[in-house]
Image (tube, helix red, strand yellow):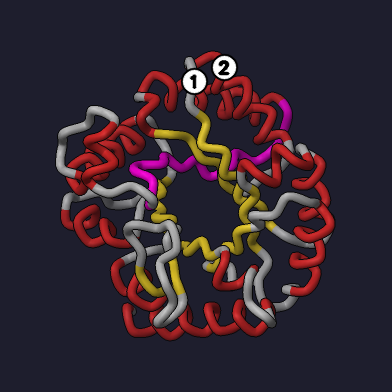
Amino acid sequence: MDRLIVALDFPSEHRALNLVRSLKGTANFFKVGLQLFTSVGPEIVRKIKAEGGKVFLDLKFLDIPNTVSRAALEAARLGVHMLTFHALGGQAMLASARETLEDMSQTEGWPIPKLLGVTVLTSMDQQALGSVGIDRPLPSMVVHLARVARASGFNGIVCSPQELRLLRESGIAGMTFVTPGIRADQAPADDQARSMTAAEAIREGADYLVVGRPITHADEPDKAALHFVEEIQRARLERL
């Protein structure tokens, strides 16, 4: 069940913690993103951990190196398991954050979170990329940004499941692949431009899947989460 990350995309602590509690025994890894973190603040991370959950803090840091390093340090002190940064921030920004966390973890005695570089958002397609002045083909841009993250000493990347095979074929090995844009079988893609089912993503090489609405909007979230856990397990066995 550790391969499933449930996205707590809620505006309130009450709804988020209710879901965490209802999924005990089925899922124990939860994404805290911009909406929940902005609404509730860092205390939500502590409360999820107190319930026995692990936290993927998905704030996608992007700023000057000093600002990002300081923000990443405060996030790491919360005890999160994974932390995201926009790879577009460049190697200087990414490496600065990693070096700060390495230094302070030794001084203060806490484990460094897995550091993930976000490549291209799953809501974007080639047209959207071009609209912000990036003419490079989208798959090539994803590979390029993954290489930036790897050169910065990061543990993994966040990408759409549709780029997983290309990344592995491009020699991006030894990294953790975290993939949002996961939908249930036969479900609409919502605002995700590049999505796959859980089984498809695992077969393509995903290590962790981030799932939101197919679980959080389900009539019975615990059963929906269990379906994804079982689908992931079957696909991993097939891949092996």
Image coords of residue 90 (percent x, y)? 35, 24
Direction from residue 152 to residue 110 in the image, left or right: right
Query: In this picture, which residue range is highlighted in magenta?
Result: 108-122
184 or 108, which is in the foreground? Answer: 184
Q: Is residue 236 above or below residue 127?
A: below
Write down the quadrant of residue 91 in the picture. Answer: top left
Tell me the quarter of the image containing the N terminus. bottom right
- The residue tagged 1 is 63
Mark 1: amino acid: Asp
- SS for dot 2: helix
Image coords of residue 119 (percent x, y)? 35, 42
Write down the quadrant of residue 234 in the picture. Answer: bottom left
Contact check, label 2 and label 1, Cβ < 8 Å = yes
Q: Is residue 78 magenta?
A: no
Write down the quadrant of residue 145 in the picture. Answer: top left
Q: Residue at x 75, y 65 (%)?
A: 20
Q: Residue at x 59, y 23 (%)?
A: 103
Distance from Cα at disc 2 to Cα at disc 1: 6 Å
Circle number at residue 67: 2
* Mark 2 Cα-neighbour bin, 10 Å: few <14, some 14–19, many ≥20: some
Mark 2: amino acid: Thr
